[in-house]
Image (cartoon, rainbow, N blue to C red):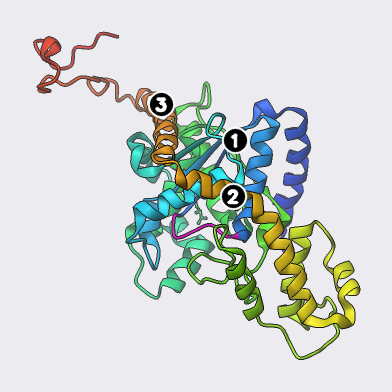
Amino acid sequence: MPELTPSQQAALKRSTTLQHQILQDPGTFRVLTGDRPTGPLHIGHYLGTLANRVRLQNLGVEVLVLIADYQVMTDRQAGRQLPATVRGVVADYLAAGIDPGRSAIFTHSAVPSLNELMLPFLSLVSDAELHRNPTVKAEIEASGKPPTGLMLTYPVHQAADILFCQANLVPVGLDQLPHLETTRLIARRFNERYAVESPLFPEPDALLTASSMLAGLDGKKMSKTSGNGIALQATEDHTAALIRRAPTDSERRITYDATGRPAVANLLDLLAATTSDNPRHLADEIGNAGAGQLKHLLTEAVNELLRPLRQRRADIVEATDYIDTVLDAGNARARDLADNTLTKVHDLLGMTYANRRTDSLFSPTRGADSSRPAGARSS
Ligand code: TRP
């Protein structure tokens, strides 16, 4: 694991406290999490965040899962295959145990009021603050292109993702902490400026998990685009092939040495996370049996862990329309929450003249009501 900065350490400490509170009082938390739909979810997602989302859901925490399809526009390799990718991600969620009866799965593009929150939020951050965000800086560097306005402002969009439903808990990896700071800042400033009497937005907490820092098979950050993770939907043979190809080193005896032998340590970390064991203990057990045995054990462990999930996934994909039905329901739930929040924001901003009409004077489908003067409302 990398050295943590003081603010990362503080967030980790706070997460431990929160874990206790969640167990005691799950009903007081609302979780918002999300992924950019850049490709199939992999074992790093499962061990790092997905399993935790399912655990929270099963504890009775309300969970909303966002498929960040507007955010994916900032990606180096934005999905031309967006519909298939998004449906695939929904299948991954469901296979992992997200229960659409309890948790909502939704997309940015289906929730206009969420996106609209970005406008007032943009007024609450300065240009300099946007340029200071280290994760955005890293993204911009990695893209090798001049940053677009969307790239620069995407922590503000992410604030809308989190605050539209007044979420107070956001399970994230370390790289997302700066974004969460922006969300907290925006919540605080909005409340100070417009909602002093009764604050509208909570300042959400990050919930960090140790395994959200797992590296990919090649030791680099595990990511959908660099293909160094094991996709949840991969076959057992493909899984074996991917692990066979993972780099190790020429030393026969397996030891755990994160700095001296990063490639081997990385596979041990993955095996440890998959089997809930300790990487040093595993290294001792494997010892002179070498990298071949390490890879054999890892392949077995991953395939065994993912077998039931892969079976469920196959059934889900088989059921025509099921995925779209799940998304429709999640989108409707998210729209409800977002519309409600935006109405409150409009109220607080004094924008309460004519923008709450739900029917249109000009709508040909509303014949009976179209004689009402524009701006008249029934509520
Ligand atoms: N930025 C996140 C990522 O790159 C994805 C994301 C978008 C997200 N909106 C979010 C995560 C809101 C948590 C909360 O993985």
Position of residue 81 in the picture relative to residue 13 (left or right): left
The count of marks equals 3
Q: Is residue 40 magenta?
A: yes
**Residue at the image position 52 percent from the left and 50 percent from the top:** 314
Q: Quadrant of the N terminus?
A: bottom right
Position of residue 125 in the picture relative to residue 14 (left or right): left
Q: Describe the element under mark 1 as helix, strand or loop.
A: loop
**Residue at the image position 90 percent from the left and 72 percent from the top:** 285
Which callout, 3 or 1, points at the residue further toward the start of the chain? 1
Which callout, 1 or 2, points at the residue further toward the start of the chain? 1
Alpha carbons under labels 2 and 3: distance apart: 33 Å
- In the picture, the disc for residue 311 is 2
Kind of residue indicated by mark 1: Asn
Q: Quadrant of the C terminus?
A: top left
Alpha carbons under labels 1 and 2: distance apart: 34 Å
Q: Describe the element under mark 3 as helix, strand or loop.
A: helix
Residue range of the region highlighted in magenta in the rendering: 37-42
Position of residue 344 in the picture relative to residue 28 (left or right): left
Kind of residue indicated by mark 3: Asp
Query: Does the rendering let one see residue 123?
Result: no
**Residue labelled with disc 3:** 336
Location of residue 183 in the rendering, given as x and y in whole percent from the top left corner: 52, 44
